[in-house]
Amino acid sequence: MGRPDSHSASPPYVELHCHSAFSFLDGASDPGELAAAAAELGYPALALTDHDGLWGAMEFAQACKGFGVRPIVGAEVTVTAAEPFHLTLLVEDAAGYRNLCRLLTKAHEHTRDNPQREAGQPSVALEEVERLSEGLVCLSGCAGDGALAGRWERGEPGEAEGLGRRLLAAFGRERFRVELQRPYWRRDRTRNRWLASLAERLGVSSVATGDVHCHDRRRSRLQDAFVAVRLGATLEESEPLRRGNSASVLRSPATMAERFRDHPEAVTESVRLAERLRFDLTSELGYRYPGADDLDADRRLAELCRELLEDRYAGRREQGEARGRLEEELRIIRSLRLSGFFLLHRDMLELAREVAAEVRGPDSARSVLPPGRGRGSSVSSIVCYLTGLSHVDPVKAGLFAGRFLNEEISAVPDIDLDFPRDIREKLIPRVHERYGTDRSALVAAFPTYRPRGAVRDLGKALGLPPGEIERVARMVDFYGGPQAIERDVAAAIGDRRAASVRWRRLVELGCEALGLPRHASQHPGGMVLSTQPLVEICPVVPAAMEGRQIAQWDKDSCADAGFLKIDLLGLGMLSAVERCVEEVARTRGERLDLSRIPLDDHRTYEAIRRAETTGVFQIESRAQMQMLPRTLPQNLDDLTVQVALVRPGPIQGGAVHPYIERRRMLRECPRYEVPYEHPSLRPVLEETLGAIVFQEQVIEVSMALAGFGAGEAEGLRRAMSRKRSEAAILAYRERFIDGAVGRGVRRAVAESVFAQIEGFSGFGFPKAHSAAFALLAYQSAWLREHRGPEFLCSLLNEQPMGFYPPDALVHEAQRRGISVLPPDVNRSQVLCHVEGLEGCGTSSSLATRSGGRTVSVLSRDRSGAKRSDDAPHPLPTLGVRVGLGYVNGVVEDEMKALVAERESNGSYRGIADLASRSGAGRDGLERLAWAGALDQLGPGGRRAALWRLGTAPGGQRIPAGTQLSLSLEPPAAPELPELGRWEWVLADYRSTGMTLGDHPMELLRDELGPGVALSLDLKRMPDGGAVEVAGMVVARQRPATAKGVVFMLLEDESGTINLVVPPPVFERHRVEVRTAPLVRASGRLERRQGAINVVVSHLARLERPDLPLAEVRHIEPPIGRETGRERSDWEPLPEELAAVAPAAHSFGRRGR
Amino acid sequence: MQTRVDGVPLAVGSVAVESVREEWLVEDRWWTPQPLRRRYFELVLADGRDVVVFEAEDSASWFLQRA
């Protein structure tokens, strides 16, 4: 208490009871922080004993090794009882580890046995603990809830002693200890005296532990707040369950010895016990994957591949090269004993093929498509290509396999497979069936605290007003440091409020919480398989989705454990493409085989070069659209580079501008000589014009310039790609520069090239991955160009996905002449679908009906660009009908019933007919009415429909469904005023999240004055000229690579506008930039090779007294939706906006 | 109140401390303008009384309460 920690030459104490942040919302330090603090304090060993889990055990073990601290594996296990209690279980040997994993699996086994499958409190029966006690050392538990101390605290010393004797019988004198803790609570001394005397009576030793919850005193307050968050309470309300002081910080051995000065023998026992606990998680797992021991695997794989090669390459000029590559890969695979690994993946793909056939059905237009596609570096392997694990011919595409497969790799390589979502959903439980539920599991993921979540959680714990919390959550940037945060908070809620103690504490807590895991979740698709029971290697817990289970380790821990991880990823665009193929078959009777579409379609590339790529896979983002008119891709190879170019690696490595500039030079002067830093780099960087764009190029450059071996080069790539180790990178830097200089390269050149590699730092795509994605990008661009309505329809049905919400997708499609029709109870399906338009001519006269009135969607000249084939862009007789499921709040089953009834017994003739036959409840019908879906059932529009619904006898919800009513037509509605144009927009956003008629900017245009340019006008304005624009904010981005520049994408009624907000302007207008849904901006027009930006000098919130601000939504798409990265910051919009937020399918589809 | 260098009471008023039965620490309300940090001692005094004293660190004052 208040004494400084001090080192001791011979540590008198070892901490055997310690929680990390993987005791979710209880521990407040990550395993690395604990390991570092332990080393700093002079601990030779440290046990990690998180609640009911080993979630952080591997990370802790790895971190400890780096700091020279011996990690001890353990857990604080909750035991089932009328009053559940805790035991601290520590692993002594491999048998103990297996038993602990089994116990923890048991503890979680029934935690989701409830209809909502919400996670409950894990606990395991004492009988199971007794049965699986071998190899474990049992400490009697913590001061508050421990098996003995807890009962003593509750005045049950007799029961405590009885339980102690039972535990002694189970574990024996050598492996049972009475645990003494000193949390500085009121009855510590009395309790410990009693526990020590009980230990004597039982004939066992007592041991002192610290019940550590954080590594540093600064985190004590966060630990308090976490407890409140866990309880869903404020700090005041959670007082009885908080620790009450900061005594649970990791302190030095000497300090702890002093704390337990009344029980020196218990302190000494901690050291003696730690000496015995020698199980090493990093080397004693004994994991093997299925097929690892198959002695015949080499022969089977070789025979399979050779046969497939002769078929696939028959008569092609690449056949000889392919044979050579195959034999080389097979040789490496044999030497690495990985044949079983590839056969296992092949087996998995065959299983996927079966599942795909079931999901798609035999007559589906999708049946010609492969069940999934490869992604990642495995696409470079010819073995993967031949066995169906990749769809890109690596010989033809010139892909380099060294990143994926080389003789020096130290871990099993990754093979990632993308599947349409519906196939993946069925495939995962089938994998559990095929390999056994005790031998397969999904990989865990740990959503970590990010700024918005931290403000919301911690603000609530601090009892701050919800409105203020929300304002700050949307404003604050915790990565800017405490001063910037304080300034943001002040900007959001005012200086006086920001200066209050609670808000200052929120800033402190928020900074401390960032990056700590909040709870466990599941990886988007990583699965681990094992030959021996997985539940003996890593605890397994049920997932939120029925039929799935999760291992307690994330992908990094699984990789450290050497687990074979197969990524079965759900890729939204793959699903959308398959939907599109089906929709095309339905509407046009055409069976599209995407593997046979021309890969050099002029019209598709023209559109790509004009950056008309909204909705196209990978090249639709604001940044990509800026780049496309400058790089002007001509073919799939160019698209492969394009996909990889707009990534942090190439951007930070300084690759982007040289690549763009050299492409321009080559276009303008075909004899232009691309400069290379060194001649040896020409062969490896030629395809990217001397720039490092792909991950493989880091390897290839290291080998070519510095003479690295393949494994050493891969080591450099890994050192930079995962939790970056400065020391490791420094070591590689020296070797790289020495190696290059030794090969005659000038030191300055070697340093410059290494700086590019370091800047790249692994945050880029392997070329093989880019090639796979580029093909899908092209296919989606082709569909957009040639099957526009079906493609839009598929995107709408597959939300959430991509960069743009449905509102923006629809507006962009309307500007291209695609009709989007409102929901209609007599026309709509549950999902969106494509239907023929009645009485429409060419695209120039297309119009949509929006709730009984005609809205021109092509009132302006759109692009002025002449199309390559002069064909009308979309098929003029098809439009996209919005599905009833897009209406917020309706019940999916009711909408299905409504559609089924209509298809069986004919259209609804009126509102009473609808109310009596549809099976939908009053609430659902009212929501449909607000969305305009009843407009065609009678005159008067939405208000009249609502009024008449109010008088129509509707169905009544009963447990068995809906009791239908008699069809008695209600009286006509009285004269009700038509919805105003703003009201119309409001109703659209409220009901479907998108407006098909007036754009909000169209309604504001007259108010803006003549000086405000339309997005369309920018194309005709001179470079460098002053300009003023206004629009609805579609996206705000502040990339870490942009040095403080904020990019905003606005949408007005004629298109989109890119704003570049320089740091000083951002500083002046932080609130508006971050929060305003509609803005007006003035600045300078900047034109660069077809890309147009407005460099902002002044920006203001666009306001009007009658402006329904709630109608306009803030859209900030999450990063890396398709890559499965965490998106804890993609959180629901605040209550006041939620009602009108766009992009909401009503059946829980968004966010899935 | 007389204390040792480590802050443990030696005497309450003029009555010597016979033994320290318990010692505990309360740190709370750090998120308010009145944070609380109190170091408590349950003492047996030389005159046989059992008392609880605490030091409120914000005021550096000692308080006596019934055990």
Image (cartoon, grey):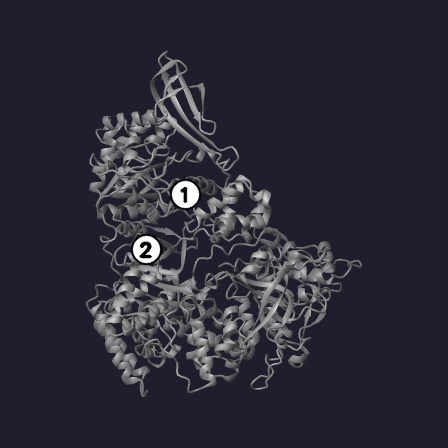
For residue A121, the mark is: 1
Q: CA distance from mark 1 to mark 2?
A: 24 Å
Residue A588 sits in quarter:
bottom right
At label 1, which amino acid type do we have? Gln
The x and y percentages for residue A53 are 34, 46
Say which element carries label 1.
Answer: loop
Residue pushed farthest right?
A975
Residue A889 located left or right of residue A691 = right
Q: Nearer the viewer, residue A1022 or A389?
A: A1022
Residue A722 located left or right of residue A175 = right
Q: Nearer the viewer, residue A989 or A184?
A: A184
The reply to the same-chain question for discs 1 and 2 is yes
The x and y percentages for residue A15 are 28, 39
Q: Is residue A361 above or below residue A1072?
A: below
Chain under numbered label 2: A
Circle 1 crowding by C-alpha within 10 Å: few under 14, some 14–19, many from 20: few
Say which element carries label 2.
Answer: helix
Which residue is labeled 2 in the image? Answer: A557
The x and y percentages for residue A474 are 55, 53
Residue at image point 30% right, 77% down: A680
Residue A96 sits in quarter:
top left
Q: Is residue A367 visible?
A: no
The x and y percentages for residue A440 are 32, 58
Q: Which quarter shows the N terminus of chain A?
A: top left
